[in-house]
Image: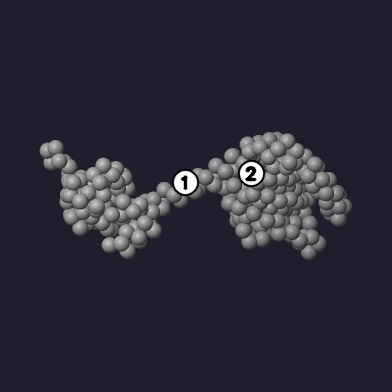
Amino acid sequence: MKSLISRLEQLGFSEKESAVYLALLQLGKANVTVIARKSNINRATVYNVLETLKQKGLVIFIQKGEERYYTAEPPERLVTALKIQADVLKEKIELADDLKLSLQAIKSTGSSAPKIRYIETLDGLQLMRREFEERGDDILQIVGYDNFLKLLGDSEKSNRKESIKTKTHVRSILVTDREVTTGNLSNIEILQISPSLFITPGEMTVAGDRLVLFSYAENIIAIEITSKAIADTARATLELAWQEVKRLSGF
């Protein structure tokens, strides 16, 4: 019996919950007095434990007059209950992963220290882009376009086009030999450079006081740094790159 209690504790049961559940499995149906005697736990505690097990879906009761009789659900129900908990936990993790971006955005890191956040999900990447574009700051970037398409696919390519249908002025240096056009989006300028001349597996984007470094090598990784000094330094570097690509392109 002790080994069963120990194994139930590994599943998240308390020692008393384990003892009461096992006692009920053996008894079949019993009132609190009998359960307390069988589990060697006082009646007041057994009431609380039974309520907890009932909330977990592992115990049911039948009312007969003034007496309440409890029954343990079959052991198969234990597996089902744990699967339900796992599904709920998964939803909470996904919610927390989405919420952390908003929470990080308001987190104070001191008056002069740069704010840094790290992202490694597609949802987080899309949220970061929306924040960039909603701010309205001019965007300057260099993008390893082939790696971008390989990792994220055409669906994200479409999402990206939709997201920049704003008045935000975007200048993009695309590292690709593919033919890329802006369509009828007058707020976007594109320069292209062949991967044979310049290779980058990621992206560098600067807008306002924010610099974002993306990696599209194998998984989505993005680091956003909010700092005017750092953003200005990156912007100056990208401006030089923009002018050099224009020169190489014959503009």
**Foreground: 53 or 176?**
53
Q: Is residue 93 above or below residue 187?
A: below
**Which residue in the protein does label 2 denote?**
128
The extreme left residue here reads: 65
Front one among 220 and 86: 86
Q: Position of residue 40 (x, y in %)?
A: 24, 52
- Residue flagged by tag 1: what amino acid is it? Lys
The residue at 39%/50% (across/down) is: 85
The picture places residue 173, in percent across and down from the top left corner, at 76, 51
Disc 2 to disc 1, C-alpha distance? 21 Å
Residue 118's place in the image compared with 75, above or below, is above
Compare marks 2 and 1 and give the one earlier in the sequence: 1
Left or right, residue 85 beside residue 132: left
Residue 147 rendering spot, x and y as whole percentages: 67, 59
- Amino acid type assigned to the residue bearing label 2 in the image: Met
Give the residue pinned by disc 1. 92
Classify residue 219 by image quadrant: bottom right
Point 70% across, 56% down: residue: 202
**Rendered residue at 55%/44% (across/down):** 98
**Residue 214's spot in the image, x, y percent?**
68, 53
Classify 10 Å Cα crowding around label 2: few (below 14), some (14-19), many (20 and above).
some
Instruction: Report whether residue 173 is seen.
Output: yes
**Number of residues whose C-alpha sits closer than 10 Å to that of mark 1, classed few (under 14), some (14–19) or many (20 or more):** few
Residue 193 in the figure: left or right of residue 34: right
| In this picture, residue 167 sits left or right of residue 58 | right
